[in-house]
Amino acid sequence: MKLAVALAGLGVAARALGAQTVSVSASRWLTKTPIYDFTAAIHEGALGPFRWKPMVRYTSVAGAEPAGFLGAGADLRLPLGARARPFLTGGISAGFLNLHSSLGVDPWFAWGAGIGAELVRTRGFGIQVQALYQQLSSNHSSHRLDGVAIGIRMGNPFGRSPAEAKPAAPAPSPASRPPVARPDSGRAIPLATAASPASTLRVVDAALDAMGAPYRWGGSNANGFDCSGLIVYAYRTIGLELPRHSAEQARAGVDLPREVEGLLPGDILAFSADKGGSVTHVGLYVGNGKFIHSSSGGVRVSQLSRDDREGKWWWPRWVGARRVVGGRG
């Protein structure tokens, strides 16, 4: 019951913040003494073929020598296929806190290694299971804790779809890109000749050129982007420096009605993870009811619609739109 309740809460948090590369996990050691691990991470990096996550870890130990070890570490994964089914995994962690110790101070160290598989992968969200051999040593326990732990991880997807696994194709020229529909006419017009400010078209072109770039917390160049970093990068192509944070970008320029029909390519869309909450994500409108943004799966185009499968998730979280350059052409 304890593990199930924790998983439910962690899953809700990870799904709500999936666009910011949040992931959480919970596991149960298969030992006589009940031991539970909980981790949380808000970043992901790459080291060659490996993927790694810095994490905060809490390990709860019951029995005759109860303990609550709190610390930090790193989680390392090696995919064994394009969709990471399965993958090798391991990690190390350490800390100085024991919440069950009278003084609260108890140095500890842990490591683990095992294998996992991704069971579910949707846009911006994934669920993986894993089995690891774990060891934990501390001054608190009279013996070393070790055993196999079975757990589940939820948050940004770890495996990639076949399309994402392919090398990025050269960016198409503006003339060969799909047309963008003028919201007021519904007529498809090529990007290169669409009747909107030329500078705004250059902004949209720059964002489309970044398609397939990985998500990187704090990133604003071709090595990786976070959501606001992509907007900054695109608008820099016309010499306009926008605020770096999504909440500030959601106040830039001129406020627009929350109506898809009134949007133009280049408008900034603002989203909130919680209804009535602060802005946590931004994207760039490209036309045809679509917007380009950088979330946990990297830079991609999504639909803004009540009827689209993915759009149903974004639509209620869309809280505003801003026009930074020009008006209707």
Image (cartoon, grey):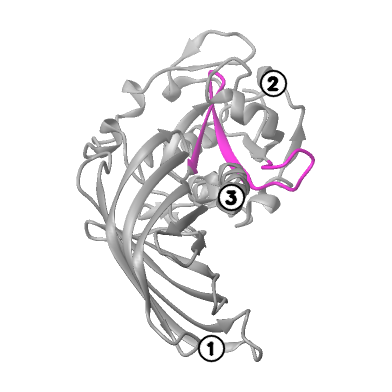
Q: Is residue 56 above or below residue 108?
A: above
Q: What is the three-letter code of the residue carrying label 2?
A: Gly
Which residue sits at x=30%, y=36%?
164
- Image quadrant assignment for residue 271: top right
Say what secondary structure mark 1 lies in: strand
Left or right of 184 in this view: 111: left
Tell me where the magenta segment starts and ends, as one range.
272-294
x then y, percent, for residue 106:
53, 88
Mark 2 closeness class: few <14, some 14–19, many ≥20 residues within 10 Å: few
| Residue placed furthest toward the right | 276
Q: Earlier in the sequence, mark 3 or mark 2?
A: 3
Q: Identify the element where label 3 is drawn.
A: helix
Location of mark 1 (residue):
106
Q: Is 236 above or below relative to 287?
A: below
Q: CA distance from mark 1 to mark 2?
A: 60 Å
Mark 3, residue position:
10
Give the camera-side residue of 113 and 51.
113
Residue 293 counted in the magenta span: yes
Residue indicated by mark 2: 262
